[in-house]
Image (cartoon, grey):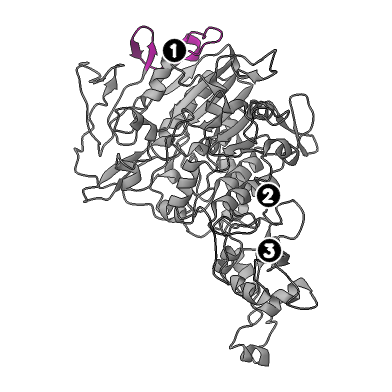
Amino acid sequence: VAMARPPSRVALLVVLVAGLAYAQDMPDMGDGMGDMPPPPVGCGWPKEASACPMWDGLKYVHPETHMPYDISQQDVPCTSQAATCRFTSTLECEPGMKTLAAMDTAPVNQKLYYQLKPGSPTVCGHGNREFSFFAHKGQDTSKVIVVFASGGMCWDAESCGDPMFRSMAIDALQGSELAPAVGSVFTNAMRLTPANLKTGILSPQPLVQDSVTGMWSGNGFADWSVVVIPDCTGDQGVGSRSYTYDAGLPTCITAHHHGGVNTGHAIHWMLQNFMGAQQVLLVGTGPNSDSMANGGHGIAYWSTYIKSKAPNANIRTVIDSSLALVGPGWKDAMMMDTWGTKMTKVPDPAEDEEDLLFPPGSFDMAHDDLSYFYELAAAHFPTLAFMDVSSTDDPVQKKTFMTTGGLDRDCCLDGCDCEGVVLPRGVRGGRLDWTKTRKVAMLRRLRRQQLHYRPWLATGTRRFLLMDATNFHMCPDGSMTCEDGKLHDAVWAFATSRNTVAQDGTLDAVNSAGVAVRSIQFMEDNVCSMCLGGVLDGEAVGDKCQATMGEGENLFSAAAKYKTDWMALWSLNGDASPDALGTGTSYRFAHEYIVQQGDTLESIAARFGTTVEALVELNYNIITHINNPFRLHHGDRICLVPNFATHKDRMGNPVCSPSDPRVQAAGGTI
């Protein structure tokens, strides 16, 4: 595939588009090639930009007069100037953004944060607060942790605007701040005494072992430098659009989804000031373990750009409490790309429309998922790797899943959370079940990305585990006493491991001692017992299209779940009698098909007498899940139930003639 410009100028996802030929022929389905939504019409606020209020440590003031000053939501983002602030006895600011070289190195066992304000066009979500990020110059500037502190995702007037229900910059609401802003949870971190941004993986205390109990505490990353990027725009740090929700209604809000702009400026500063970094750990998490935000996985979308600009650095991405699990309503919410992700520029574009974070056809927020992005990134930058850290029943992740159409419980078999679920006969459960969705997503990532993915999963409801001193040393079973598998140790092992590419092109993952590691081996110590269990075909080998016979079920009643008949199921399972399968036994419900070169889901559907929609539904939320029907790889395995009446052989000839008595007797279908 031809490059968009000379190789010396190739950056970020231009490479990704070049590598995925199958994406080029995608029809317009919200992939960046269709018409974009109209610009925001506004909510009747002034069309002239006002100055952004400036926080002086006590109150908001005008940036020029320093008199008390504030503004409400704006249709046009407020304007601000670049500045650097530091807290001594008071908050002191000076014009321009300091370089790392001009910053003081923090004393041992302390965190010293500078607040960096890029100025316009960066802004927070209601257009009335300036954006800023924070930097700590550690003892070691060759190693840097980049924290994307999620603020929450929003996609309508309620979640973006209403203070009672808002999920945009939700942590700002913990204080007296009603507008989405870089809240006090961040600004207070500049003081030496509060624990803000100074605990867990950001603790300045070195790793030590208690001589009596043998328990470890502290932080192996204590001497690393840190860049913290707050999220105050509700778009996972990848948006670039101002969009009006509920125009003309009392609930009208113009949300300035400028997260891609904000994050881009922060990452650009990081790349310019840590040019010699040998290790870069990207962390998507929250500001503290009490945060109710979601969306930290947005930092993963920047991993490829950072790798393209720092090719010699060992880059690892850890996502904490943000598995990116959503219900079927997510696609509807993202269909119009109200965040503007298809227009987000990388921080240093070369006046080329290809310099987008997600070039047309490469990735679509509505139709693709985080699992696909992990694959996409690793395919083009083989030394990248990703790690998910989560608890099994994180209430905020579960709320996002249910808000977008998922359910807490939806079935009682094959990996679901069974308690209290009774389904009518012939109804297939599990498609919307939270527990099964979590298991399927993590198992698929494990199976498809052996050298690029690591999971760490604990029982319970705790969240933002990396940002809590106790949780950071927790075991997957919730205790503190395991020999292997503590979160700190797992993250350290992952962060210091490398994916190596041999001269023959083969890839291997090695730890800091040079010993080869595999995802499955890693999982044994770092996933709570049975927390990924129960999903049929969850292992790397075995039949993919299986289900478990429920109580009182038989082939006759099970057939309705898959829109087939009992004879087709009987022929798949080879028993002497169709009544032989009892409760709790597994059975094949469909044929397994291996995708061939040149196959599309449409061509497969036509060949086997079914439809694209039926194939997507049949494979939904099982190991062969199809998130985007236009993203099929050669070698993928899918389940299918042929319609023999319209099934064609390899030559395109019907398997059954329309005049076949069996077809006529079945009313045209078999």
Crowd tier of the residue under label 1, counting other residues whose Cα lies within 10 Å: few below 14, some 14–19, many 20 or above? few
- Viewer-closest of 352 and 90: 90
Crowd tier of the residue under label 3, counting other residues whose Cα lies within 10 Å: few below 14, some 14–19, many 20 or above? many
What residue sits 52% from the left and 11% below the top? 110
**Does 63 appear in magenta?**
no
Percent coordinates x, y for residue 568 in the rendering: 70, 77
Quarter of the C terminus within the rendering: bottom right
Circle 2/circle 1 CB separation < 8 Å: no
When the figure is inspected, residue 579 is found, relative to residue 212, above or below; the finding is below
- Viewer-closest of 290 and 568: 290
Crowd tier of the residue under label 2, counting other residues whose Cα lies within 10 Å: few below 14, some 14–19, many 20 or above? some
The part of the image, by quadrant, that contains residue 634 is bottom right
Callout 3 amino acid = Thr
What residue sits 53% from the left and 47% below the top? 325
Percent coordinates x, y for residue 64 in the rendering: 23, 17
Whether residue 412 is visible to the viewer of this picture, yes or no, is yes
Label 3 vs label 1: CA separation?
56 Å
Label 2 vs label 1: CA separation?
44 Å
Nearer the observer: mark 3 or 1; the answer is: 3
Secondary structure beneath dot 3 equals strand
For label 2, the residue is: 533
- Viewer-closest of 137 and 501: 137
For label 3, the residue is: 548
Callout 2 amino acid = Gly
Magenta residues (range):
84-113
Percent coordinates x, y for residue 100 in the rendering: 49, 14
Callout 1 amino acid = Thr
When the figure is inspected, residue 408 is found, relative to residue 664, above or below; the finding is above
**Tag shown at residue 193:** 1
